[in-house]
Image: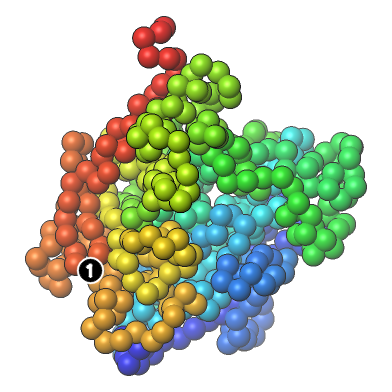
Amino acid sequence: MDDIVVRFYSFFGIPYALPPIGHLRFKPPEPSQHWDGIRDATQEKEGCISRNPLTQKLEGGEDCLFLNVFSPMMLSGSKTSKPVMVWIHGGAFQVGSTTTDLYGPEYLLTQDIVLVTVNYRLGALGFSCLEDSTLGVTGNNGLRDILMALKWVKANITGFLGDPENITLFGESSGSVSIHYLMLSPLVKDLFHRVIMHSGCALHHWAEGARNSLRELAKILGLSSGSDKEILEFLQQQPIEVLYDAQLKVKSGISPHIKRHFYPVFEKPSPNITPIITENPAKIIASGNYYKVPMMIGYTSKNFEHMIPHHLNIPHDTPLSRYIANEIKSFYFNDEEPTLTKHKTAFYEVFGDIFFNYGLMATALMHLETLGYPIYYFRFSVDGEFNFYKGNGLPGASHSDDACYLFKVGCRVNEVAENSLEDITIQRMVKLWTNFAKSGNPNSEEFKDINWKPIEPTKLHYLDIGENLSMGVNPEYDMFVFWDKIYKMKVLPGKM
């Protein structure tokens, strides 16, 4: 793959909103201003302040609401509009950027598409709220950043030979959660036309955060009390580096029973701001009152009361919570007392199912009842050399590995050998993903031996992307049945 010379144009650091600094810190984005003359778009801009997920170095700044456009325009003299793919990076709403060290466009630009990558605010700057709705800090500004970027793409992508009527929104982990929230929002009509969701959806327990994050942040910095207005003014005056360091000290965690700080929230009414989302995503999906577009969705293959997701609203140390804890122990550990050395694989399975797999499968099946478009489900199981986070010594794919085969990223450990598993997987993924972006159907002549079927009510057809491509039905179905029972359990069995 590396031997192929891919020619395309790169336009870096295009502002889609005003710098969110000063009095705009913690506030919704405001549209960027027009500029006169020619803008230099030849150098990459820094992303929003966070730690690089590969190097762990603090990078970026506060003036970061930029996007990049990559286009094969004018190379062949064609004036035909091209399908547009807009990438939303993951990183737990806390880290990540559009740097080409993480998301190089070379693989996707082997196909005749236009690619857009978007920076959006992270952590406290992007996902904080205050209860005083008159202050305009209702939460979800990172999502609003993405929304504004999509409006810019819709209005301007024709200048890069992109088709504004054929936009596919795709992303991974928290980027995929962001896509799902936007799909469920009343604010996105006609801004995109298909979605591809990697390992993330709004039904995950970690997709909803705590509401008191800014007050906790102010306490860390010495303001232990005060009105929401005083807290906002105090935090707007802090140096960005001080604010970032303090954000890391706000108590949070990855345990399913705890709401995380600086994550999306269900917004309360505000006199001046239209909310992104106000109610439970499952309720919105069931109602059918959301923006409906064709969907591809999938995942990578890998005290027990603390494993009960918080949004089940089951009190700790109650008969029901203890019963569910024992059910989890029985299902994953055969009623044995678990140890990391003896049950390493099971630990990864339970966290993978809680954090990703159940929510994705439930999302696909719930949308099937109301979406009205095909839903293509996939499982990425390539145990290859390209990994973001893998270090557990277990076989299979790890979280985010699939992105390494769509983008030329820093997780690569060596060059791509021709006809290697990595080379073959890159070509397969790029073609399947761009097929879907072009037509809403990932199938094509290149894959004549595989008919990737959309899911059905009783058959969750899925494409397994491993050493070979193969079709299956109902992956990990026993896991789904188990967690579906848990999620529907409100009282102890046998009691009313």
Q: Nearer the viewer, residue 332 or 134?
A: 332
Q: Is 248 placed left or right of 374 in the picture?
A: right
Q: Residue 88 appears at what percent x and percent y?
A: 49, 62
**Colouring used for the render:** rainbow
Q: Is residue 334 visible?
A: yes
Q: Residue 487 appears at what percent x and percent y?
A: 41, 28
Examine the rendered structure and indicate whether residue 239 appears above or below residue 406.
above
What residue would you read off at disc 1? 467
Could you say whether the residue bearing mark 1 is in a helix, strand or loop? loop
Q: Nearer the viewer, residue 363 or 179?
A: 363
Q: Residues within 10 Å of mark 1 (few under 14, many from 20)?
A: some
Q: Is 5 placed left or right of 389 in the picture?
A: left
Q: Nearer the viewer, residue 213 or 64?
A: 213
> Could you tell me which quadrant the N terminus lies in?
bottom left
Examine the rendered structure and indicate whether residue 296 appears above or below residue 327.
below
Total marks placed: 1
> Could you tell me which quadrant the C terminus lies in?
top left
Q: Residue at x 25, y 72 (%)?
A: 428
Q: Residue furthest top?
A: 496
Q: Nearer the viewer, residue 454 or 248?
A: 248
Q: Is 136 placed left or right of 477 in the picture?
A: right
Q: Residue at x 41, y 63 (%)?
A: 393
